[in-house]
Amino acid sequence: MALLHHQRAAQLIDAATPFVTVTLIKADGSVPQDVGASIIVTRDGLDHGTVGGGRVETAALKHAAEMLKGDQRNELLEWNLNLDLGMTCGGRVTFFFQRVDTAAWPIVVFGAGHVAQALTRLLTTLPCQVTCVDSRPEWVERL
């Protein structure tokens, strides 16, 4: 299962599809899944795996979806299954949420002259975030 999970993550990275992995890193008491269980969540929802199904997985999916909308990269969340999620089992789980955003290569171009003008036009066709540094605002405005 872990190999398939990693293969799927590699496919999403190759396709430049942002996703969040959610991994159960700690479990105490009665919980629906074993430590190490994980899911991959894309903007379309659950893509691969399980962390136990039901309310716990629904909550994990919801949080991962929120992460994909914002800027948060990594987060640890601990839930009491009874108190926080209304489940009858009395355990506690800790999840590690990790966002993988392959669509925003950070590229910095120093200077906004003729070469940078051509280069930035090319870079805008790629999945990257371009920052141009130049002391001449009139040249930066041309980008």
Image (cartoon, rainbow, N blue to C red):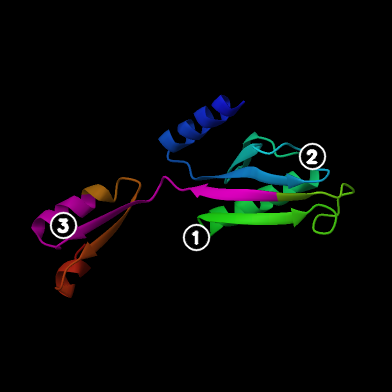
Mark 3 residue crowding within 10 angstroms, few (<14) / some (14–19) / many (20+): some
**Which x, y percent locates residue 43?**
57, 46
Q: Which of 34 and 111 is in front in this view?
A: 34
Q: Position of residue 82 (x, y in %)?
A: 85, 54
Identify the residue at horizontal 68%, vertical 39% (top origin).
Answer: 35
Residue type indicated by callout 3: Gln
Q: How far apart are marks 2 and 3 (CA)?
A: 55 Å
Q: Which element is circle 2 on?
A: loop
- Residue sitting at 62 percent across and 25 percent down? 1
SS class, disc 1: loop
Residue that mark 3 sits on: 117
The mark total stands at: 3
Q: In front: mark 1 or mark 3?
A: 1
Residue, disc 2: 32
Instruction: Tell whether label 2 touches label 1 (CB within 8 Å).
Output: no
Residue farthest to the left, as pictured: 114
Q: What's the amino acid at mark 1?
A: Asp
Precedes in sequence: disc 1 or disc 3: 1
Q: How crowded is mark 2: few (under 14 residues within 10 Å), some or many (20 or more)?
A: some
| Residue to which mark 1 is pinned | 71
For marks 2 and 3, give the one nearer the viewer. Answer: 2
**Residue 30 placement: quadrant:** top right
Q: Is residue 106 left or right of residue 39?
A: left
Q: Nearer the viewer, residue 95 or 142?
A: 95
Secondary element at tag 3: helix
Span shown in magenta: 94-121
Give the residue at x 49% y 60%.
Answer: 71
- Measuring from the top left, give residue 140's x and y in whole percent: 19, 67
